[in-house]
Image (cartoon, helix red, strand yellow):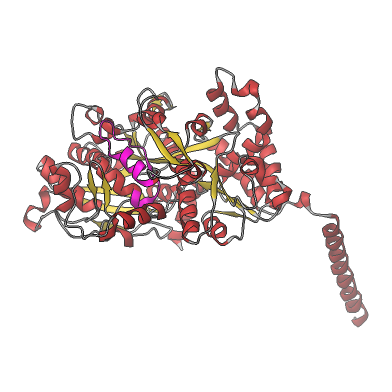
């Protein structure tokens, strides 16, 4: 009982009690199908482009049991990687790296033979878990043994509660707003200068991070310090709307006002967390302003957009509360995970969704020969990130641990490992690959049109891959993909142009907004219909009458 009470108290102290970005280990159905089509022969071993990469993929065949680790809600189970050949007598020479990541958010290996990804630059194949491969690579590269203690969490709030209750980790992977919160609380250790040294060929992150993503991390600040000083990106995406094009048009789905459209009453679902729903509500309330020519063409459009979408004035909070209470009466449900299944089964026609889960939803529907599309609201979309940060309480002044932690980030940022993770998870990595062509090749492998395919269009992703946003990073793709999985995994430059980050709410604002959310999710007495009041008054009158009869009876008995 004490543990439960402490956990609940920690949640209240955290001040952020709602779920922003759960993730699930999924392989895109398109990737699975493409792998099956292209591979009918047995796989003899991986060929990932360099000797070092092949060695780390082939060494230490023990598969880590990461897939069996799951958050229990009050903490996380821990599963260690392989010992990398360590025995008891040299145990003291082993660096122990304590990593805490989202559930099922890293490739566990053990791919089947028909899952090989055959790119122009070489094949990608996940034989071992990336944890085991990292331990082998680290020893081969730095001559030191490292043992990863790998734990998982289910939500950012779970992670924060775990830290509050005393769990100690060296490297964690929260979402952008939790990174901002931990920065503001001075809990993070800065990344070393060497981490960003692009002359070191093992610094795969700094050499391969998308210029677009890097610009965000190096320009966004908390208390005068950039995100990039403390955080390295892992996965990213945007929010949008998965919809059934048989019943909802693209125009109807391309606006946040869809969720108060009475035409689709009880056929829509929205997110059961305050941050996503708050963003959606502002987008709907400010729809005319955000789409007006004067607003869009303003030279300060992007800053103005961020200011509007992060408005936490008392007036806006009150408007959002009223709007969401109206929306609650129009939608089928608030949900965190059930929306995917509800879309696939046809229970609902549209679902507010994170792009990674949108891909999963469309993939699953495709397997049932059931077409779903993805739309990015014309008002704005929320861009989100998960990123790696080092904790002061874990690493402290241990330079060997810090080197191992930064090496772990770099290893996961190596293009072949990036592809393995994207294939396994279904979300999009922040890594574009730099001069390594394999990330773009993988994108083409997934979505490129066949040579004889008709109804194709050019899809420009230069903003993500090219330092100056121009170049040859243009795919010829089936036209339908501009409204489906591709547009969710790698949004168009048009969608990106109206993206906004939702910033961290300070404790005072967070408390007010959380109370607003409680008011939305609880019964709203102001919206009780007339017949409800009549029944309530009648019930009260009936109870009063029965009480008066009892009192009168007692008096007569005396």
Q: Which residues are magenta?
A: 423-446
Magenta-span inclusion, residue 170: no
Q: Residue furthest top?
A: 299
Quadrant where the C terminus lies?
bottom right
Relative image position of residue 266 (x, y in whole percent): 68, 56
Relative image position of residue 294 (x, y in whole percent): 64, 20
Exactly how many numbered labels are in the figure? 0
Say if 104 sits above or below 546 in the image: above
> Looking at the image, which is closer to me, 558 or 76?
76
> Looking at the image, which is closer to me, 6 or 130?
130
> Looking at the image, which is closer to me, 271 or 209?
209
Q: Residue furthest left?
A: 89
Relative image position of residue 159 (x, y in whole percent): 40, 49
Quadrant for residue 240, please give it: top right
Magenta-span inclusion, residue 445: yes
User: Is 298 displayed left or right of 92 in the figure?
Assistant: right
Image point (61%, 43%), residue name: 250
Quadrant for residue 42, please give it: bottom left
From where the camera sits, is residue 235 visible? yes
Quadrant for residue 72, please give it: bottom left
User: Is 92 displayed left or right of 299 in the figure?
Assistant: left
> Looking at the image, which is closer to me, 476 or 185?
476
Image point (23%, 27%), residue name: 198
């Amino acid at each position: 009982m004490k543990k439960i009470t402490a956990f609940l108290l920690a949640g209240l102290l955290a001040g952020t009690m709602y779920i922003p970005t759960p993730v699930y280990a999924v392989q895109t159905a398109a990737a699975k199908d493409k792998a099956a089509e292209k591979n009918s022969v047995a796989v003899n071993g991986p060929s990932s482009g360099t000797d070092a990469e092949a060695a780390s993929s082939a060494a230490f065949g023990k598969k880590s049991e990461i897939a069996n680790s799951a958050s229990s809600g009050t903490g996380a189970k821990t599963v260690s990687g392989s010992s990398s050949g360590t025995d008891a007598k040299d145990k003291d020479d082993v660096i122990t790296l304590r990593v805490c990541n989202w559930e099922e958010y890293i490739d566990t290996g053990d791919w089947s033979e028909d899952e090989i990804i055959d790119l122009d630059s070489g094949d990608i194949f996940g034989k071992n878990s990336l944890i085991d491969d990292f331990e082998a690579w680290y020893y081969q590269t730095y001559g030191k043994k490292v043992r990863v203690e790998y734990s998982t969490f289910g939500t950012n709030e779970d992670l924060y509660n775990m830290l509050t209750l005393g769990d100690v980790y060296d490297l964690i992977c929260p979402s952008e707003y939790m990174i901002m919160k931990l920065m503001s609380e001075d809990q993070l250790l800065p990344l070393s200068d060497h981490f960003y040294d692009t002359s070191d060929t093992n610094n795969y992150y700094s050499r391969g991070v998308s210029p677009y993503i890097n610009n965000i991390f190096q320009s966004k600040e908390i208390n005068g310090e950039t995100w990039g000083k403390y955080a390295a990106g892992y996965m990213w995406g945007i929010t949008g709307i998965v919809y059934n094009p048989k019943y909802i048009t693209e125009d109807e789905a391309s606006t946040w006002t869809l969720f108060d459209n009475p035409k689709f009453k009880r056929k829509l679902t929205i997110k059961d967390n305050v941050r996503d729903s708050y963003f959606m509500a502002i987008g709907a309330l400010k729809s005319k302003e955000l789409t007006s020519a004067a607003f869009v063409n303003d030279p300060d459009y992007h800053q103005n957009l961020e200011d509007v979408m992060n408005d936490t004035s008392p007036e806006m909070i009150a408007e959002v509360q009223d709007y969401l209470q109206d929306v609650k009466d129009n939608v089928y449900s608030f949900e965190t995970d059930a929306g995917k299944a509800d879309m696939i089964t046809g229970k609902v026609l549209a679902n507010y969704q994170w792009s990674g889960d949108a891909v999963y939803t469309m993939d699953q529907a495709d397997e049932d020969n059931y077409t779903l599309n993805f739309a990015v609201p014309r008002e704005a979309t929320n861009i989100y990130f998960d990123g790696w940060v080092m904790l002061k309480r874990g690493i402290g002044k241990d330079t060997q641990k810090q080197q191992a932690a930064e090496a772990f980030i770099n290893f996961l940022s190596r293009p072949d490992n990036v592809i393995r993770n994207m294939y396994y998870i279904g979300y999009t990595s922040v890594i574009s690959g730099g001069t390594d062509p394999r990330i773009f090749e993988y994108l083409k492998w997934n979505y490129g049109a066949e040579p004889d395919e008709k109804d194709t269009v050019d899809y420009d992703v230069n903003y993500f891959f090219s330092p100056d946003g121009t170049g040859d990073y243009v795919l010829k793709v089936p036209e339908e993909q501009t409204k489906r999985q591709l547009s969710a995994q790698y949004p168009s430059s048009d969608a990106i142009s109206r993206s906004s980050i939702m910033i961290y709410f300070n404790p005072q604002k967070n408390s007010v907004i959380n109370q607003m959310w409680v008011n939305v999710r609880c019964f709203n007495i102001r919206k009780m219909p007339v017949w409800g009041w009549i029944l309530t008054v009648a019930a009260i009158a009936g109870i009063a009458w029965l009480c008066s009869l009892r009192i009168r009876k007692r008096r007569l008995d005396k």
